[in-house]
Image (tube, grey):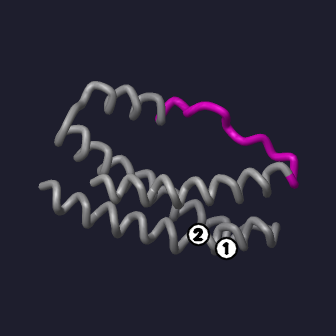
Amino acid sequence: MKQFGARLASDHTKSSKDMKKLAAQWRVPLPTAPDGKERAELAQMARLQGAAFDKQYVKTEISDHKTDISDAKKEISSSSNQQVINEARKDLPVLQAHVKLAEQTQSQLC
């Protein structure tokens, strides 16, 4: 479980740097706080501990990453901005690897 979390943290830190650079270049504001859905997920997980927390965390990561994959595919197929398309193409395999890793982690927790 720790390896899973460490991998996500490492990959997302790198991706965030790239996204912040692109957003600054295009003067697109990025969220500075979790949205309503994310706040609800965080509140739910804050009440959990141990194995229950691990299971919910992995379940949430699978769901969120699948949404991110869908969003990346949509950007690749419909964006008119080549930089956005390139960023989505770069992130897509990482997101897919995260889902695979999360599903493997989930199977070990059950």
Query: Which one is in front, 41 or 71?
Result: 41
Q: Secondary structure at mark 2?
A: helix
> Quick one: 51 or 72, which is closer to the camera?
51
Residue 1 coordinates in the image, percent (x, y): 27, 54
Q: Number of marks in the image?
A: 2
Identify the secondary structure beneath mark 1. Answer: helix
Disc 2, disc 1: CB below 8 Å? yes
| Numbered range of the magenta stretch | 25-37
Tell me: 40 left or right of 94.
left
Tell me: 104 left or right of 39: left
Q: Is residue 44 above or below residue 80?
A: above
Cα distance between the residues tagged 2 and 1: 6 Å
- Magenta region, mostly helix, strand or loop? loop
Q: Residue at x 33, y 27 (%)?
A: 46
Quarter assignment of residue 40: top left
Q: Residues within 10 Å of mark 1 (few under 14, many from 20)?
A: few
Residue at 67 percent across and 72 percent down: it is 76
| Residue 77: numbered disc | 1
Kind of residue sitting beneath label 1: Ser
Mark 2 Cα-neighbour bin, 10 Å: few <14, some 14–19, many ≥20: some
Residue type pointed to by label 2: Lys
Q: Residue furthest left?
A: 110
Judging by the rendered image, the residue that carries numbered circle 2 is 73
Which percent across, then down, holds residue 102? Answer: 32, 61
* Residue 32 belongs to magenta span: yes
